[in-house]
Amino acid sequence: MRSFLSLLLLLSIACTSCLKEPVDDGPGPGAGKGAYQFNWPGIADSAQAALGGSFYNSGGKYFNKNNAGDVTFNYWPNAHALDVLTDAYIRKNDEAIRTRMNDLLDGMKVKNGNTYINHFYDDMEWMTLACLRAYEATGDARYKTVAQELWNDIKGGWDDIWGGGIHWNKDKSKKYKNTPANAPACIIAARMYQVSRDPADLEWAKKIYEWEKATLVDPASGLVWDGINQDGSGTVNKDWKFTYNQGVFIGAGVELYKLTGETSYINDALKTANNALGGDFTQSNLVKDEGGGDGGLFKGILVRYLLLLITDGDLNSTDKTRFMSFLQQNAETLWLQGTSRPQIFFGPNWKAPVTTTDMTTQLSGVMLMEAMAKLSEN
């Protein structure tokens, strides 16, 4: 019996390690890319351990704003934290991770006033996407229920101002509609259709996509603009160029391509992805620094949907290799040059280590390492 209990203890320690202790804390001093063997699943485990160990608020069951003592709850980054935990759960099938996911689902509701409904449509969309992935990964109907509740509310953000589209938030008098409230909604509608097979969801996906493409995408380059009427002028703001807007439009194209088989969708995604690897969004072939706070999460979202394009986009070998190499270069640079040790913290500049960081920027780094762990499976 004693040996059996010892075995159970060892198994318990092993299954929770990716939440608590680094598995791979990185290269020794002076190691270069050629001298270091990248164990991407181990690196992803270490990144997850740092996220849980330095940001998770076990009393409140949510992730703190930063690792410097600010325990503020922010809704949309915590939705992405659920998405990142789902990445780890899919990879490891670890019940400790599933427990953390369930706790976060409960904690977010409490911290948001005992509801998942939010003033901002884009915030709710990130949570809906996270819940749909969690439902697909676990089969737990609670995630599906939350996703459906949010989706029903999100659809109320659509009206005919500017020819359609979903408002950024529920103060519709501002008449501000943007990519973060529309491209993710398109992905939601497509994925809801996969779950429900309700034709109305597919029609929503197509309708939102058509509005987004016609209103907020440069037809020549594929660059995705942020929004229309941000300053009250009724015009599109073409100066705000954010990485996450490129990512979610790529994701929308991939999802509709998967459902319809229409190559126009994947061609749109490819055009935007190719442009996203260019000068507006990269510096020396690394995704650009967009600061901390909300901006810290932007490039992680681009990474997530570049990964989806690679895995689900039916790309030719040349395109697939180019995007894989791009992610690999970013991940290797972040791990060798931009990671603080032994803490495993990530900052907004993937070539510069930090000692304190926001949860948003940490999440982007974890997303990148999970993307590489996924690609290393093939």
Image (spheres, rainbow, N blue to C red):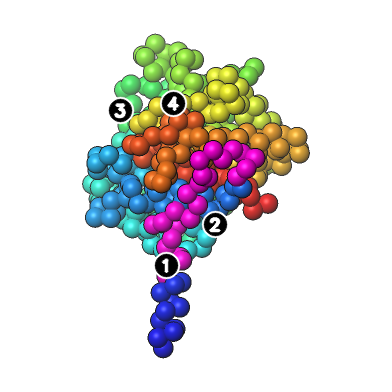
Residue 120 lies within the magenta run: no
In space, the residues marked 3 and 1 are separated at their CA atoms by 49 Å
Mark yes or no: residue 377 visible: yes
Instruction: Give coordinates of residue 309: x percent, y percent.
Output: 63, 39
State the image coordinates of residue 302 (x, y, percent, origin top left).
Answer: 53, 34
In the rendered structure, find residue 201 and report the number of the disc placed on it.
none
Q: In this rendering, does residue 252 appear at all?
A: no
Q: Are marks 4 and 1 in contact (CB under 8 Å)?
A: no
* Closer to the eye: label 3 or 1: 1
Q: Tag 4, which secondary structure?
A: loop
Provide the residue designation for mark 2.
Answer: 91
Secondary structure state at the residue bearing disc 1: helix
Q: Depth-wise, is mark 3 or mark 2 nearer the camera?
A: 2
Residue located beneath label 1 in the image:
13
Element at badge 3? loop
Name the front one of labels 4 and 1.
1
Magenta range is 12-36
Residue at screen point 33% across, 26% down: 172
The residue labelled by disc 3 is 171
